[in-house]
Amino acid sequence: MAVYPTMILPKRGKAFVSVVVAVLVALSLFLPLLGPSRVSFEASSSSLQSSSSHDPLADIQNSTLGFGSLILLSLPSRTDRRDAVTLIADHTNITITKVIDGVRTEDIDERAYPFGPGLDKLLTEKYHAYLGSWRSHMDIFRYIVENRIESALIFEDDIDWDINIKSQLTFFAQSLRMSPLRRPYSTYELQHAPYGLDWDMIHFASSEIRLAPPPRDKAYVTYQDPYRGDLETVNNGCTGKYFCWKPLLRSTDAWDNKRSIVPTYNSVGLSAFAVTYRGAKRLLYYLSYKELTDTLDRSIANLFMNGDLHGWSVIPPMMSEWKLDGKKDTNLRVLAADHQPGLGNMEGHSAGLSQSVRKQMARDLEIDDYWENEKDHWSLVNNNPPPAPVPAP
Protein backbone atom coordinates (compact mmCIF):
# COMPACT_ATOMS: atom_id res chain seq x y z
CA MET A 1 0.00 0.00 0.00
CA ALA A 2 1.40 3.37 -0.99
CA VAL A 3 2.21 5.83 1.83
CA TYR A 4 1.74 9.53 1.12
CA PRO A 5 3.45 12.31 3.11
CA THR A 6 1.31 14.38 5.47
CA MET A 7 1.29 18.15 5.07
CA ILE A 8 1.40 20.09 8.39
CA LEU A 9 -0.26 23.50 8.20
CA PRO A 10 -0.44 26.32 10.75
CA LYS A 11 -3.88 27.20 12.14
CA ARG A 12 -4.30 30.09 9.70
CA GLY A 13 -3.41 27.79 6.81
CA LYS A 14 -5.92 25.21 8.01
CA ALA A 15 -8.62 27.85 8.13
CA PHE A 16 -7.77 28.92 4.55
CA VAL A 17 -7.93 25.36 3.30
CA SER A 18 -11.30 24.88 5.02
CA VAL A 19 -12.66 27.94 3.21
CA VAL A 20 -11.33 26.70 -0.17
CA VAL A 21 -12.86 23.27 0.37
CA ALA A 22 -16.18 24.82 1.31
CA VAL A 23 -16.15 26.96 -1.86
CA LEU A 24 -15.31 23.96 -4.05
CA VAL A 25 -18.08 21.91 -2.51
CA ALA A 26 -20.54 24.74 -3.09
CA LEU A 27 -19.41 25.09 -6.69
CA SER A 28 -19.77 21.36 -7.26
CA LEU A 29 -23.37 21.60 -6.12
CA PHE A 30 -24.19 24.84 -7.90
CA LEU A 31 -22.46 24.52 -11.27
CA PRO A 32 -24.58 21.59 -12.51
CA LEU A 33 -27.60 23.84 -12.19
CA LEU A 34 -26.02 26.22 -14.69
CA GLY A 35 -25.52 23.51 -17.31
CA PRO A 36 -23.38 20.47 -16.64
CA SER A 37 -22.91 19.57 -20.29
CA ARG A 38 -21.17 22.85 -21.03
CA VAL A 39 -18.78 22.53 -18.09
CA SER A 40 -17.88 18.93 -18.91
CA PHE A 41 -17.51 19.73 -22.61
CA GLU A 42 -15.04 22.54 -21.97
CA ALA A 43 -13.01 20.39 -19.62
CA SER A 44 -12.84 17.49 -22.06
CA SER A 45 -12.05 19.85 -24.92
CA SER A 46 -8.82 21.15 -23.44
CA SER A 47 -7.63 17.71 -22.34
CA LEU A 48 -8.35 16.07 -25.69
CA GLN A 49 -6.81 18.83 -27.74
CA SER A 50 -3.63 18.61 -25.73
CA SER A 51 -3.44 14.82 -25.88
CA SER A 52 -4.30 14.04 -29.48
CA SER A 53 -4.61 15.61 -32.92
CA HIS A 54 -5.96 12.48 -34.63
CA ASP A 55 -8.64 13.10 -37.27
CA PRO A 56 -11.02 10.14 -37.38
CA LEU A 57 -11.78 10.79 -41.05
CA ALA A 58 -8.60 8.82 -41.69
CA ASP A 59 -10.25 5.80 -40.00
CA ILE A 60 -12.64 5.46 -42.93
CA GLN A 61 -9.70 3.92 -44.81
CA ASN A 62 -9.50 1.07 -42.30
CA SER A 63 -11.10 -2.35 -42.73
CA THR A 64 -14.31 -1.38 -40.91
CA LEU A 65 -14.78 1.95 -42.73
CA GLY A 66 -14.49 3.94 -39.50
CA PHE A 67 -17.34 2.10 -37.78
CA GLY A 68 -17.02 0.06 -34.62
CA SER A 69 -18.33 -3.03 -36.40
CA LEU A 70 -19.45 -4.24 -39.83
CA ILE A 71 -22.33 -6.69 -39.48
CA LEU A 72 -23.68 -9.03 -42.14
CA LEU A 73 -27.24 -10.32 -41.92
CA SER A 74 -27.63 -13.61 -43.78
CA LEU A 75 -29.69 -16.77 -43.60
CA PRO A 76 -27.38 -19.73 -42.89
CA SER A 77 -28.89 -21.48 -45.92
CA ARG A 78 -27.81 -18.70 -48.31
CA THR A 79 -24.24 -19.85 -48.60
CA ASP A 80 -24.16 -18.46 -52.14
CA ARG A 81 -24.70 -14.96 -50.83
CA ARG A 82 -22.18 -15.37 -48.02
CA ASP A 83 -19.59 -16.46 -50.58
CA ALA A 84 -20.28 -13.34 -52.63
CA VAL A 85 -19.99 -10.92 -49.70
CA THR A 86 -16.74 -12.58 -48.61
CA LEU A 87 -15.31 -11.96 -52.08
CA ILE A 88 -16.39 -8.33 -52.49
CA ALA A 89 -15.36 -7.42 -48.94
CA ASP A 90 -11.90 -8.85 -49.47
CA HIS A 91 -11.64 -7.11 -52.85
CA THR A 92 -12.05 -3.72 -51.16
CA ASN A 93 -10.04 -4.52 -48.00
CA ILE A 94 -13.14 -4.57 -45.83
CA THR A 95 -13.66 -6.91 -42.88
CA ILE A 96 -17.05 -8.23 -41.84
CA THR A 97 -16.63 -8.45 -38.08
CA LYS A 98 -19.88 -10.24 -37.24
CA VAL A 99 -22.39 -12.42 -39.10
CA ILE A 100 -25.90 -12.50 -37.65
CA ASP A 101 -27.90 -15.50 -38.81
CA GLY A 102 -31.22 -14.62 -40.37
CA VAL A 103 -34.34 -16.05 -38.72
CA ARG A 104 -37.19 -17.80 -40.50
CA THR A 105 -40.75 -17.01 -39.41
CA GLU A 106 -41.53 -20.62 -38.58
CA ASP A 107 -38.70 -20.63 -36.02
CA ILE A 108 -40.21 -17.78 -33.94
CA ASP A 109 -42.25 -18.68 -30.90
CA GLU A 110 -45.67 -17.10 -31.26
CA ARG A 111 -45.32 -15.69 -27.76
CA ALA A 112 -42.37 -13.64 -29.04
CA TYR A 113 -44.36 -11.93 -31.79
CA PRO A 114 -44.42 -8.12 -31.56
CA PHE A 115 -47.37 -6.06 -30.42
CA GLY A 116 -49.12 -3.61 -32.70
CA PRO A 117 -51.12 -3.40 -35.94
CA GLY A 118 -48.11 -4.44 -37.99
CA LEU A 119 -48.44 -7.98 -36.66
CA ASP A 120 -51.82 -8.41 -38.34
CA LYS A 121 -50.21 -7.59 -41.67
CA LEU A 122 -47.25 -9.90 -41.09
CA LEU A 123 -49.55 -12.80 -40.28
CA THR A 124 -51.13 -12.68 -43.74
CA GLU A 125 -49.87 -15.14 -46.34
CA LYS A 126 -48.32 -12.41 -48.48
CA TYR A 127 -46.19 -10.93 -45.69
CA HIS A 128 -45.68 -13.91 -43.38
CA ALA A 129 -41.99 -14.29 -44.29
CA TYR A 130 -41.41 -10.66 -43.30
CA LEU A 131 -41.87 -11.62 -39.67
CA GLY A 132 -38.56 -13.49 -39.84
CA SER A 133 -36.91 -10.40 -41.31
CA TRP A 134 -38.21 -8.35 -38.40
CA ARG A 135 -36.78 -10.78 -35.85
CA SER A 136 -33.44 -10.93 -37.69
CA HIS A 137 -32.99 -7.18 -37.45
CA MET A 138 -34.00 -7.17 -33.79
CA ASP A 139 -31.18 -9.67 -33.18
CA ILE A 140 -28.76 -7.20 -34.79
CA PHE A 141 -29.92 -4.31 -32.63
CA ARG A 142 -29.74 -6.48 -29.53
CA TYR A 143 -26.18 -7.53 -30.40
CA ILE A 144 -25.12 -3.88 -30.74
CA VAL A 145 -26.73 -2.93 -27.43
CA GLU A 146 -25.36 -5.95 -25.57
CA ASN A 147 -21.84 -5.18 -26.77
CA ARG A 148 -22.23 -1.39 -26.48
CA ILE A 149 -20.91 -0.83 -30.00
CA GLU A 150 -20.67 2.91 -30.61
CA SER A 151 -21.60 2.67 -34.30
CA ALA A 152 -22.12 -0.19 -36.72
CA LEU A 153 -22.74 -0.58 -40.45
CA ILE A 154 -25.18 -3.37 -41.32
CA PHE A 155 -25.29 -5.14 -44.67
CA GLU A 156 -27.87 -7.55 -46.00
CA ASP A 157 -26.30 -10.33 -48.04
CA ASP A 158 -27.47 -9.09 -51.44
CA ILE A 159 -25.42 -5.90 -51.11
CA ASP A 160 -23.20 -4.28 -53.71
CA TRP A 161 -21.05 -1.18 -53.36
CA ASP A 162 -18.67 0.90 -55.44
CA ILE A 163 -15.02 -0.07 -55.73
CA ASN A 164 -14.25 3.44 -54.41
CA ILE A 165 -16.52 3.13 -51.37
CA LYS A 166 -13.87 4.34 -48.90
CA SER A 167 -13.37 7.57 -50.83
CA GLN A 168 -17.12 8.03 -51.21
CA LEU A 169 -17.68 7.62 -47.49
CA THR A 170 -14.87 10.07 -46.75
CA PHE A 171 -16.53 12.76 -48.88
CA PHE A 172 -19.84 12.03 -47.16
CA ALA A 173 -18.40 12.19 -43.64
CA GLN A 174 -16.45 15.36 -44.33
CA SER A 175 -19.54 17.06 -45.74
CA LEU A 176 -21.69 15.96 -42.79
CA ARG A 177 -19.13 17.35 -40.37
CA MET A 178 -19.16 20.76 -42.09
CA SER A 179 -22.91 20.77 -42.62
CA PRO A 180 -25.24 23.29 -40.93
CA LEU A 181 -27.86 20.51 -40.81
CA ARG A 182 -26.66 19.52 -37.37
CA ARG A 183 -25.10 21.18 -34.35
CA PRO A 184 -21.30 21.54 -34.36
CA TYR A 185 -19.46 18.34 -33.59
CA SER A 186 -18.46 17.81 -30.00
CA THR A 187 -14.80 17.42 -29.18
CA TYR A 188 -15.33 13.69 -28.67
CA GLU A 189 -16.86 13.35 -32.15
CA LEU A 190 -14.01 15.32 -33.71
CA GLN A 191 -11.53 12.95 -32.10
CA HIS A 192 -13.31 9.61 -32.38
CA ALA A 193 -16.33 9.56 -34.70
CA PRO A 194 -15.83 10.23 -38.43
CA TYR A 195 -19.60 10.31 -39.04
CA GLY A 196 -20.46 12.00 -35.75
CA LEU A 197 -22.77 10.36 -33.24
CA ASP A 198 -25.73 12.75 -33.16
CA TRP A 199 -27.98 10.40 -35.15
CA ASP A 200 -29.78 7.09 -34.82
CA MET A 201 -29.58 5.70 -38.33
CA ILE A 202 -28.01 6.51 -41.72
CA HIS A 203 -29.49 5.07 -44.91
CA PHE A 204 -26.70 4.23 -47.38
CA ALA A 205 -28.88 2.04 -49.61
CA SER A 206 -32.48 3.02 -50.30
CA SER A 207 -34.96 2.10 -52.98
CA GLU A 208 -37.10 5.16 -52.29
CA ILE A 209 -36.50 8.45 -50.46
CA ARG A 210 -39.09 11.11 -49.78
CA LEU A 211 -38.18 14.54 -48.47
CA ALA A 212 -39.92 16.03 -45.48
CA PRO A 213 -42.90 18.26 -46.38
CA PRO A 214 -42.35 22.02 -46.84
CA PRO A 215 -40.68 24.00 -45.47
CA ARG A 216 -38.46 21.21 -44.14
CA ASP A 217 -37.80 19.96 -47.69
CA LYS A 218 -35.22 22.75 -47.97
CA ALA A 219 -33.08 21.20 -45.24
CA TYR A 220 -30.33 19.60 -47.30
CA VAL A 221 -26.70 20.05 -48.26
CA THR A 222 -24.91 19.05 -51.42
CA TYR A 223 -21.30 18.00 -51.82
CA GLN A 224 -18.96 16.94 -54.58
CA ASP A 225 -18.29 13.24 -55.10
CA PRO A 226 -16.13 12.53 -58.18
CA TYR A 227 -16.95 8.82 -57.89
CA ARG A 228 -20.72 9.25 -58.09
CA GLY A 229 -21.16 8.46 -61.78
CA ASP A 230 -23.08 10.32 -64.46
CA LEU A 231 -26.82 10.91 -64.41
CA GLU A 232 -27.59 7.98 -66.71
CA THR A 233 -25.69 5.60 -64.44
CA VAL A 234 -27.26 7.00 -61.29
CA ASN A 235 -30.77 6.49 -62.66
CA ASN A 236 -30.20 3.19 -64.48
CA GLY A 237 -32.32 1.17 -62.05
CA CYS A 238 -35.42 3.38 -62.16
CA THR A 239 -38.60 1.31 -62.31
CA GLY A 240 -41.01 4.24 -62.30
CA LYS A 241 -41.30 4.14 -58.50
CA TYR A 242 -38.11 2.69 -57.03
CA PHE A 243 -34.46 3.72 -57.58
CA CYS A 244 -35.54 6.89 -59.40
CA TRP A 245 -33.22 9.70 -58.31
CA LYS A 246 -33.61 12.41 -60.98
CA PRO A 247 -36.48 14.24 -59.22
CA LEU A 248 -34.59 14.28 -55.91
CA LEU A 249 -31.39 15.42 -57.57
CA ARG A 250 -33.36 18.25 -59.10
CA SER A 251 -35.02 19.13 -55.80
CA THR A 252 -31.70 19.27 -53.96
CA ASP A 253 -29.58 20.85 -56.72
CA ALA A 254 -27.27 17.84 -56.82
CA TRP A 255 -26.00 17.82 -60.39
CA ASP A 256 -22.53 17.27 -61.89
CA ASN A 257 -21.26 14.46 -59.68
CA LYS A 258 -22.86 15.83 -56.54
CA ARG A 259 -24.71 14.03 -53.78
CA SER A 260 -27.16 15.38 -51.22
CA ILE A 261 -27.51 14.71 -47.52
CA VAL A 262 -31.03 15.11 -46.17
CA PRO A 263 -32.53 14.49 -42.72
CA THR A 264 -34.29 11.14 -43.06
CA TYR A 265 -38.05 11.51 -43.30
CA ASN A 266 -39.34 8.59 -45.36
CA SER A 267 -36.57 6.34 -46.66
CA VAL A 268 -37.27 2.74 -47.60
CA GLY A 269 -34.69 -0.02 -47.85
CA LEU A 270 -32.42 -1.81 -45.39
CA SER A 271 -29.75 -3.30 -47.65
CA ALA A 272 -27.07 -1.11 -46.04
CA PHE A 273 -27.57 1.20 -43.08
CA ALA A 274 -25.64 2.40 -40.06
CA VAL A 275 -26.83 2.74 -36.49
CA THR A 276 -25.32 4.20 -33.36
CA TYR A 277 -25.56 2.49 -29.99
CA ARG A 278 -28.31 4.96 -29.08
CA GLY A 279 -30.08 4.24 -32.37
CA ALA A 280 -29.94 0.47 -31.89
CA LYS A 281 -31.39 0.87 -28.40
CA ARG A 282 -34.22 3.05 -29.67
CA LEU A 283 -34.98 0.70 -32.58
CA LEU A 284 -35.10 -2.30 -30.26
CA TYR A 285 -37.41 -0.39 -27.93
CA TYR A 286 -39.82 0.94 -30.53
CA LEU A 287 -39.94 -2.12 -32.82
CA SER A 288 -39.80 -4.99 -30.33
CA TYR A 289 -40.71 -3.77 -26.84
CA LYS A 290 -43.39 -1.27 -27.85
CA GLU A 291 -45.16 -2.07 -31.12
CA LEU A 292 -44.80 -2.70 -34.83
CA THR A 293 -46.96 -0.43 -36.97
CA ASP A 294 -46.29 -2.04 -40.38
CA THR A 295 -43.63 -4.12 -42.11
CA LEU A 296 -40.17 -3.44 -40.68
CA ASP A 297 -38.97 -0.87 -43.24
CA ARG A 298 -42.29 0.98 -43.20
CA SER A 299 -42.36 0.93 -39.40
CA ILE A 300 -38.90 2.51 -39.33
CA ALA A 301 -40.07 5.12 -41.84
CA ASN A 302 -43.04 5.89 -39.57
CA LEU A 303 -40.70 6.44 -36.63
CA PHE A 304 -38.70 8.98 -38.64
CA MET A 305 -41.82 10.77 -39.87
CA ASN A 306 -43.11 10.99 -36.29
CA GLY A 307 -39.80 12.42 -35.09
CA ASP A 308 -39.05 9.44 -32.85
CA LEU A 309 -35.79 8.74 -34.71
CA HIS A 310 -33.24 11.07 -36.25
CA GLY A 311 -30.80 10.31 -39.03
CA TRP A 312 -29.51 10.99 -42.51
CA SER A 313 -30.13 9.73 -46.04
CA VAL A 314 -27.75 10.23 -48.94
CA ILE A 315 -29.00 10.92 -52.48
CA PRO A 316 -28.25 9.05 -54.66
CA PRO A 317 -27.43 6.12 -52.38
CA MET A 318 -23.84 4.81 -52.32
CA MET A 319 -24.83 1.14 -52.07
CA SER A 320 -27.44 -1.00 -53.73
CA GLU A 321 -29.03 -4.43 -53.98
CA TRP A 322 -27.51 -6.96 -56.39
CA LYS A 323 -30.24 -8.35 -58.64
CA LEU A 324 -30.38 -11.51 -60.75
CA ASP A 325 -34.02 -11.05 -61.80
CA GLY A 326 -35.15 -14.42 -60.53
CA LYS A 327 -35.93 -16.53 -57.50
CA LYS A 328 -32.44 -16.03 -56.05
CA ASP A 329 -33.34 -12.39 -55.38
CA THR A 330 -35.67 -12.89 -52.44
CA ASN A 331 -36.17 -14.83 -49.24
CA LEU A 332 -39.36 -12.95 -48.40
CA ARG A 333 -41.86 -14.22 -50.98
CA VAL A 334 -43.28 -17.62 -51.77
CA LEU A 335 -42.43 -18.30 -55.39
CA ALA A 336 -44.15 -20.59 -57.84
CA ALA A 337 -42.45 -23.92 -58.49
CA ASP A 338 -41.74 -22.94 -62.09
CA HIS A 339 -40.29 -19.53 -61.20
CA GLN A 340 -37.13 -19.01 -63.22
CA PRO A 341 -33.75 -18.94 -61.45
CA GLY A 342 -32.85 -15.70 -63.20
CA LEU A 343 -29.51 -14.43 -64.40
CA GLY A 344 -26.17 -15.74 -63.28
CA ASN A 345 -23.87 -13.48 -61.29
CA MET A 346 -21.99 -12.58 -64.45
CA GLU A 347 -25.13 -10.86 -65.78
CA GLY A 348 -26.35 -9.46 -62.46
CA HIS A 349 -26.83 -5.74 -61.91
CA SER A 350 -27.19 -3.12 -59.19
CA ALA A 351 -28.90 0.22 -59.48
CA GLY A 352 -27.00 3.47 -59.53
CA LEU A 353 -23.41 2.34 -58.93
CA SER A 354 -20.68 3.78 -61.09
CA GLN A 355 -18.13 0.99 -60.55
CA SER A 356 -19.78 -2.03 -58.96
CA VAL A 357 -17.31 -4.00 -56.84
CA ARG A 358 -18.99 -7.23 -57.97
CA LYS A 359 -18.37 -6.43 -61.62
CA GLN A 360 -14.88 -5.09 -60.98
CA MET A 361 -13.98 -8.19 -58.97
CA ALA A 362 -14.98 -10.42 -61.87
CA ARG A 363 -12.79 -8.44 -64.25
CA ASP A 364 -9.82 -8.48 -61.89
CA LEU A 365 -10.00 -12.18 -61.12
CA GLU A 366 -10.28 -13.23 -64.76
CA ILE A 367 -7.45 -11.21 -66.27
CA ASP A 368 -4.87 -14.01 -66.18
CA ASP A 369 -4.49 -16.66 -68.87
CA TYR A 370 -1.94 -19.08 -67.54
CA TRP A 371 -1.27 -20.78 -70.88
CA GLU A 372 -0.85 -17.48 -72.70
CA ASN A 373 1.25 -15.84 -69.97
CA GLU A 374 3.62 -18.81 -69.65
CA LYS A 375 3.96 -19.74 -73.34
CA ASP A 376 7.57 -18.50 -73.50
CA HIS A 377 8.51 -20.84 -70.67
CA TRP A 378 6.77 -23.75 -72.35
CA SER A 379 8.68 -23.03 -75.57
CA LEU A 380 11.94 -23.23 -73.61
CA VAL A 381 10.94 -26.67 -72.39
CA ASN A 382 10.22 -27.78 -75.93
CA ASN A 383 13.61 -26.55 -77.14
CA ASN A 384 15.48 -28.27 -74.33
CA PRO A 385 14.64 -31.97 -74.18
CA PRO A 386 15.03 -33.58 -70.79
CA PRO A 387 18.37 -35.26 -70.03
CA ALA A 388 18.72 -38.96 -70.76
CA PRO A 389 17.98 -41.22 -67.81
CA VAL A 390 20.97 -42.38 -65.81
CA PRO A 391 21.41 -46.16 -66.10
CA ALA A 392 21.06 -48.16 -62.92
CA PRO A 393 24.33 -49.31 -61.38
Image (cartoon, grey):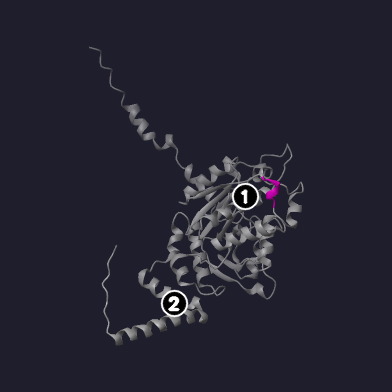
Q: Name the residue beneath numbered marker 2.
A: 42
Q: Is residue 380 visible?
A: yes
Q: Is residue 131 left or right of residue 69?
A: right
Q: Is residue 135 left or right of residue 175?
A: right
Q: Nearer the viewer, residue 311 or 260?
A: 311
Q: How many numbered discs sit on the rendered protein?
A: 2
Q: Horizontal and vertical percent for residue 339?
A: 71, 39
What residue type is disc 1 on?
Ser
> Which structural element holds mark 1?
helix
Q: Residue furthest front?
A: 11
Q: Does the magenta run of residues contain 13?
A: no
Q: Residue furthest top?
A: 393
Which residue is drawn at the image coordinates 27% and 84% (left, top)?
10
Q: Horizontal and vertical percent for residue 326?
A: 67, 43
Q: Horizontal and vertical percent for residue 378?
A: 37, 31
Which residue is drawn at the image coordinates 73% and 37% (left, top)?
338
User: Quick check: 348 above or below 28?
Assistant: above
Q: Quadrant of the C terminus?
A: top left
User: Quick check: 346 above or below 168?
Assistant: above
Q: Is residue 207 visible?
A: no
Quadrant assignment, res 82: top right
Q: Nearer the viewer, residue 56 or 374?
A: 56
> Which structural element holds mark 2?
helix
Which residue is drawn at the image coordinates 45% and 40% (left, top)?
368
Q: Nearer the viewer, residue 234 or 88?
A: 88
Number of other residues with Cα within 10 Å of mark 1, as a class: few under 14, some 14 to 19, many 20 or more:
many
Label of residue 77 in the image: none
- Residue range corresponding to the magenta coloring: 108-113
Q: Name the residue beneath numbered marker 1.
A: 136
Instruction: Measure how far apart labels 1 and 2 are at the Cα level.
Output: 41 Å
Q: Quadrant of the N terminus?
A: bottom left
